[in-house]
Image: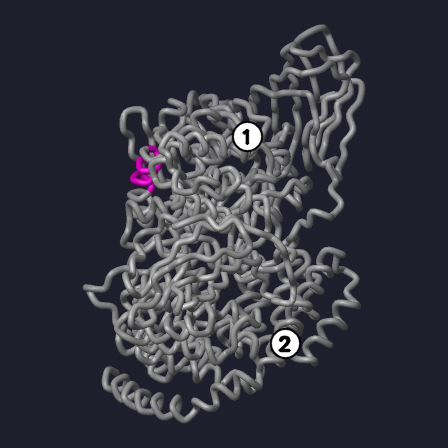
Amino acid sequence: MLRNIVKIVVLIFISENVFCDTNYRLNTPIIPSEYSVIITPYFDTADDRAFTFDGEVTIKFTTATNVREIKLHSEDLKFSAANITITGGPSNSITGLQFDDKYTFALINLENELQANVEYNLKIVYVGPIRKDLKGFYRNYYYENGVKKWLGATQFEPTHGRKVFPCFDEPSLKAVFTLTIDRPASYKQTRANTKLQSSVNLSNGYIREQFYPSPKMSTYLVAFLISEFEATVNINGSNEFGVYTRPEAKNQSDYAFDFGLRVVNALGNYFGIDYYSTNSQIGLDHVALPDFSSGAMENWGLVKYREGLLLYVPEVSTPHYKYRVAQIVAHETTHMWFGNLVTCHWWSNTWLNEGFANYFQDYITEMIEPAVGAGDMLVTGSVYSAYEADDSPEAPAITNDNVNSPAEISGHFGTVTYQKAGSVIRMMHHLIGDDAFKFGLNAYLRTNEFDVGYPDRLYTSLHNAVVTYNALSAYPETDITSVMSSWISKSGHPVLHVDVNYEENKITLTQKRFYINSSIQSDELYKIPITLTTGLLPNFKNTKPSFIMHNKTETIDVQVKTTDKHWVIFNLQETGLYRVNYDMESWKLIAAALKGNDREKIDHLNRAKIVNDLFAFLYADEVKFELLYEVLEFLSDETHYSVWNAAIRGLNKLRSFYLGSDALEIIEDYGLQLIDNIINKIGYEDKATDDFVTLRNRAQITEFACKLGHQGCVDYSLGLFKRLKENGTEISPSLRVAAYCTGLRYGNADDYDFLWRRMSTHNVANEARIIGEILGCTTDKSFKFLVSSQVEDSPIRIQDLTVPVSSVLSNYKNVPVVLEALQQNFTLWNEIYTTSIDSVLSTIATSLRTTDEFTKFEAWLNSCSQCSEQAVTAARGGLGKARATVAWADTHKADIMKSLKSLGTTINASFGIILAGLIFSMYAKF
């Protein structure tokens, strides 16, 4: 499952010392083997059955020991003891039924014991709701020619299968599922995990559709869809592949269809197991839904996505979305092997599913679609995100045994189990080489197919592959199991301190766990694959480690001086998950190289790493701002997307520390000085010769430049917005974010209403999403935006309800507006945001910067009778982060201001000359 990562984030850390309630686990001797499920839905009917369904489940099972009670999961389903029958073995009857709402169990008491190793059938007839919270079996709608159309979709991961049929809802309890759906005849079709086996017209206006039995799989992978969607289908013999959309979006599916076909074949070739060979009755459908709680979900044979994350329109969608569609389709398709064919035994090892999907989403995309730059995004996306989520003492390990309740399980689906795990897998890939890596993965999948996986099973397969290929012969004291477990079982990541003795050609390396608060100490040690190169013979292509660092400190011999001293750089192409900090002389040699002829000799991912690491060291008080400024001077001549992605990420964070402060303007002037040259080089207009990465670069540069108030960018963007509004002249996708946001920032209520209407009526989902994300650029209508996004039939989709808050808060001037809206509308907010209210409050609190804002928010929080304990805890956690941000900013403000003011004459003079030329050229165009 691809989690939806939005600007509103609450990190749920599960400490190893926290109370662990194992009562959420079934701990049952019962072993299910087959389910037969019949669902009859009632959508917008005129009676009291509207948005409910009738259900019937028959579960074939055995038990390992004699039992007189059956314990299984059931949540929000209605049935009584009279609705339950059990057959097989001696005659038996139901003597009692209890529901445990806290643990979501149904407890069925029997007259006689069930005998071990005897096959039984448990049948339950029940009624359930077609939900509106995007969980279990839920209802969803869209408009077609002005008519509201309902559909029924499902989302079971991680613990929502129990909301649709009573079941043993744990990933290790795999079984075969046969689905039968009674579809209203007015609906065009039903799709499920497997192909349709039979279809019969019923007398009540329904069509009964039965699907072939599924492969042996976990309950969370069961899925079906009842809709009037249309499909683009490829049938090659018995192999079926399709993309399903609402009819008016069918023409937007071409890219997903083409890429999806290629990626399933590429992954099958890489893993050595053809997808269609796993079950002859399973196809592969990708479905674009108007609303979906996760980004996407890997249901076996029926993969579901948010519409904007599957459909791509080149003339409309920003360049980012082409990459995202490829990435997400690759992610979910990888799950057909890692997650579906072999499933993590329990959610504590979610990384066995999600870590591999996170890695291959970019690795395989780079292999078959290199134009979108997925290989670099693996670093600037996954690795950088992993660092940020992993730099506090509360950060969890990748594997965590204290995961039991649904809340704990959901909390474990996060950056550490996705991006960090994917980054560790990438590191191991580079360590053992491609042949051993592929061999090991194939062995793991073959050995455990239709079964469950454990870390030890993976390590054994990789170990055997390493032995077969002699892959670690260069590291005699190293085995793959100990290396992997040192990263998987421990939290955090290291920083490597590099101290070069140029006179003796020796380098002393010291590792320690990296904390963003450098006052925290740790004796944690990691097994670090060390790669390096020097300015004497630079080679960034060889990412095979020179050695594995096991100890806290090691000294190595490296030729770093001939007649001159040569720079040295560690962690080539960021293939290792560790930051690198150098001694001052080494930093100065690197800075000189970046500003001189050696810049292009240093791989762009290492140039990006230098930028990303320096900002992290600045916030951790490991370097001074003067060093950051000296090294980053090279950005004035830098044009690569990845390097600027790291720089914009760092500069935006620095800006966020000084929102509302008089230091903000001078920091933004510094950003403008750095960005001027690339603005001139990359330009504002797309060219036929631009490659995809150049388009993405133009998008991020113009968005950032306009945010800083770059006059040329502002003027050009306002011109684009004016022509769109007055003449309907569409804006190039790479410039839309900059143009829309600038149009609102410098516009009025009429400009806001124009974009609101465009968002409300646009047929391309990711265009509507983009507009929703930038509507907060206005201060004129920000309150209206918050309120109008929360009404019935708002153009803001259910899945995006948190977007208005994060959008409005992206403009610091709107903080008072959000506080006012919170106080006036919290009853409504609590209702519509439900489980998201914790992250909403945390994000609001994290955005505060002044004493007055802290006072007002805390006063409201202390008086909030409707706030749950969990919501209050999340809000206070956000306040703690905000206060830490303010404290850091206050401590470092004088030094940063002094450094930048000493450069002020240079900044203002050079910027003024360039600015005058840009303004002249902009007005000449219009």
Q: Nearer the viewer, mark 2 or mark 1?
A: 2
Q: What residue type is labelled 1?
A: Ser
Q: Give whichever of discs 2 and 1 has the lower sequence position.
A: 1
Q: Is 117 placed above or below 583 here?
A: above
- Asked if one can make out residue 360 in the rendered structure from this viewpoint, the answer is no
Classified by dominant secondary structure, the portion drawn in magenta counts as: helix
Q: What element carries label 2?
A: helix
In this view, the residue in front, 781 or 372, is 372
Q: Mark 1 points at which residue?
A: 218
Amino acid type, mark 2: Val
- The foreground one among 605 and 347 is 605
Q: Residue 30 carries which label?
A: none
Marks 2 and 1 close (CB-CB < 8 Å): no
The residue at 56%/20% (across/down) is 34
Rendering quarter of residue 32: top right
Per the rendering, the mark at residue 886 is 2
309 is higher (above) or lower (below) than 594: above
- What is the magenta range? 260-268
Could you say where residue 6 lies in the image, as x and y percent from the top left? 52, 59
Q: Position of residue 119 (x, y in %)?
A: 63, 11
Pick out the residue farthest to the left. Answer: 689
- Residue 610 in the image: state x and y as whole percent: 42, 67
Residue 447 makes an appearance in the image: yes
- Image x and y of residue 37, in percent: 56, 25
